[in-house]
Image (cartoon, rainbow, N blue to C red):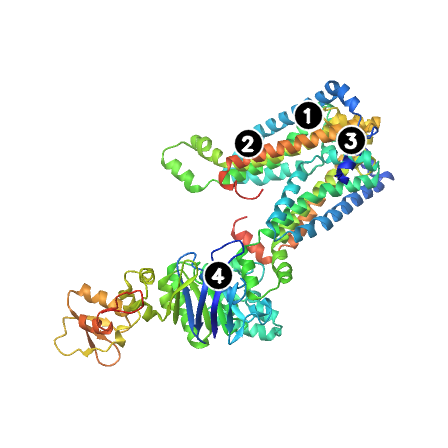
Amino acid sequence: MISDILGVFARPEFPTLLRQHIVLSVVALLIAIVIALPVALLIRNTRVGAAIAINIGNVGRAVPSLAILALLLPFLGIGFWTALVALAVLAIPPILINASTGLREVDKGIIDAARGMGLSGSQILARIQLPIAAPVIFAGIKTSAVQTVASATLATFIGGGGLGDLIVLGLQRRGPEILLAGAFSVAVLAIITEVGFGFLESAFTPKGLKIAQKRRGK
Amino acid sequence: MIEFSHVSKTYPGSNDPVVNDLSFEVPEGEICVLVGPSGCGKTTSMRMVNRLIEITEGEILIDGEPNTSMSGTQLRRKIGYAIQQIGLFPHRTIADNIGTVPNLLGWDKNRIKGRVDELLDLVGLAPDDYRDRYPAELSGGQQQRVGVARALAADPPIMLMDEPFGAVDPITRDRLQDEFLNIQDDIRKTIVFVTHDIDEAIKMGNKIAILKQGGVLAQYDTPENILARPNSEFVSSFVGGDRVLKRLSLTRVGEMDLEPANGGTDDLLRISGGLSVKDALSELIGSGHSRAVVEGEGENGLLTFAAIENLMGGASGQVTNDGETSA
Amino acid sequence: MSNPALLLLQDVLEEPKLIDWEWLRENFWEDIVPAFQGHIFLSFISVAVALLIALPIGILSARYRKVYPPVTFVTGILYSIPSLALFAILISIPAVGLGPTPVIIALVAYSLLILIRNTVAGLDSVPPETIDAARGMGLTNRQILFRVELPLALPIIVAGVRIATVTIIGIATIGAYISGGGLGALIFDGINRQFPTMIIAGAVLATAMAIIADLLLLGLERYLRPWARARKA
């Protein structure tokens, strides 16, 4: 059985599907970041804006992935681009929520001190708020990335390709080795994403904040 | 020199001013303490000096120039700012924190480094030990010292301090106050200092501005004068029913004009000249005698109740509303 | 006054190719209701079973901290496996096969991490002084757990239940692909038959169920935590 599974990886379709899956996930995540981060920056000082963003984010997080993918189908047709749009939309909420709360929860005393010392608004954003909020923002990106890789498996249902194709193929042709090869490759990809972004999160956490976290016993 | 000239602040949508026609002058090199109950506008007034809050009416002049003559950001880089929450940047080292304003002003790296070390020494933190640490590694008292150092970094002539020693325990606060007064003896900054604690105001201030609810100036004078001649019921009750005793704490018993202590004093209590008159009085009462010997430089003096009364200039001033005193 | 967005919505709603209201009316009881009921069944059972497993493990992990990291590790791995993949793995096991069973197993597996984590966090949030006072008053450990710790931990635990429920409702849609039933059946059927009405019906209903569950549980969470009611979501 193991050799059968390994045999699937050797087939020419596998690299293609893997590439499709990665491209879908990466591009969707990038689009989501490009949309969510600027919005979070814009609303960082307004209470109403932040409340709206958080509520949109919370609702967005509740929406089933398959539902979005399927809903776009009648309007945008099948294929890669529909899947991309759906995945990008799904990837926005965690980033939006984390970026908004992260920026707004920077200690007010620190911001007052910075303002009082003569830092301009953009200096405060760049030198104080963003570095301090960075761990939370990256946690949001990590959550979104893992979620996107998982949801990209569903792209197969609307003809978007990706490793989900393997799983579906295995189910249709009753080929357990194809099924399991697909399942394992997606699982491994998801875990690699989680671990990889975990490293990024750590890399972008300023040293002073890590010390503070340790002191608080986190 | 800082001058408040008929300064008022009313927030939009509200009819009542939070600061009302405030006028006073802070002489150069002196500490002026703004003190009063919650809602008296003391913090708002302070924050109008560096324009964190904008004035609605009147103006604030710094060395004769209105503080609106340059942008808010530029103004603030010339004014030291130390607040109760301290607000150290947790993601930067102590050295980076202290060097923030010099960095903004474009000083070169070596000059900044030298200044950081100088300031750490000044506030009693060994530079080699603390320069590269992070705020989370420091205790509350140490953080507060760094906060003061950071405010002094660019050597601004003026400083604004809002309960800068508020976040620590009373013993540490006492020490920080003493150390800061020592530093101020050398550096002579013009300081606006906000506190809610009348005792801190009396200890720290060369001048005290007592504010009432609604941002009205009740009395502006030296601590001694405010204690001796409060100009209203409000000021009198704000400084406390023990204001006479508070006055006694302003002088050291060794500075008093005392009769020399001649013979026949062996059984009397000995009091150190460095004690405040208030503490000396307490010892005297506790000793069960009506006299005690004050030991200091030179001759020993004889402390009596009469001598203390003399110090207070006869009967202490009674309060009248037009500011006059009656015996 | 005509609003362009409303006009577009009207178009969509009236477009005979997109939503066949006739079909919906005719097949409401045959197709839609069973799918809806099946979905509620799947979700409810999964949340219940997950709680039955996660709460004891969570309480144990809070007490014996050494257990917590391996528990987090295992449930974390389960959580990282994409749903379709986990379904695929489960139906490969001969004893399991197709149908609601693998779906429920997978849904339970997914929610373990969040439920355990929030149980531990909830119990951690109980102030030690409170437990100390309770012990001083003579309550047994069991009494402390049920009368003091769990009630105080409830808001955070409910927060976890909320996230788990919403996730389960979402992933249950995919379960239809392996004959698990639920609203996903409408979606997949619709895709196969190229019949947008079914797709939209299934997708909209599943989304609505998820959002309503989210809001209801959020309300419960806020109700249990009156001191946080005034703050933002």
Q: Are marks 1 and 2 in contact (CB under 8 Å)?
A: no
A15 over A207 or under it: above or below: above
What's under tag 3, amino acid-wise?
Answer: Leu
Q: Nearer the viewer, mark 3 or mark 2?
A: 3
Query: In this picture, is C232 found above or below A119?
Result: above
Q: Pick out the residue farthest to the front.
A: C1
- Say which amino acid is labelled 1: His
Callout 4: SS: helix
Q: Is residue B161 left or right of residue B112?
A: left
Q: Residue B180's spot in the image, x, y percent?
A: 42, 69
At label 3, counting other C-alpha atoms closer than 10 Å, the crowd grade (few under 14, some 14-19, many 20 or more) is some
Question: Cα distance, mark 1 to mark 2?
Answer: 24 Å
Alpha-carbon distance for marks 2 and 4? 51 Å
The chain holding disc 3 is C
Disc 3/disc 4 C-alpha distance (Å): 58 Å
Q: Which residue is mark 1?
A: C39
The answer for which chain carries disc 1 is C
Extreme residue in the left direction: B264
Pointer 2: residues within 10 angstroms few (<14), some, or many (20+)? Answer: some
* Residue A147: quarter of image: top right
Q: Residues within 10 Å of mark 1 (few under 14, many from 20)?
A: many
| Same chain assignment for discs 1 and 3 | yes
* Comparing labels 2 and 4, the label whose residue is closer to the camera: 4
Tell which subunit mark 4 falls on. Answer: B
Residue B22 location, x and y as percent?
Answer: 45, 66
- State the CA–CA distance, disc 1 to disc 3: 25 Å
Which mark is drawn over residue B44?
Answer: 4
Residue B150 position within the rendered picture, expressed as x and y whole percent measured from the top left: 52, 67
Identify the disc placed on residue C13. 3
Both on one chain, marks 3 and 2? yes
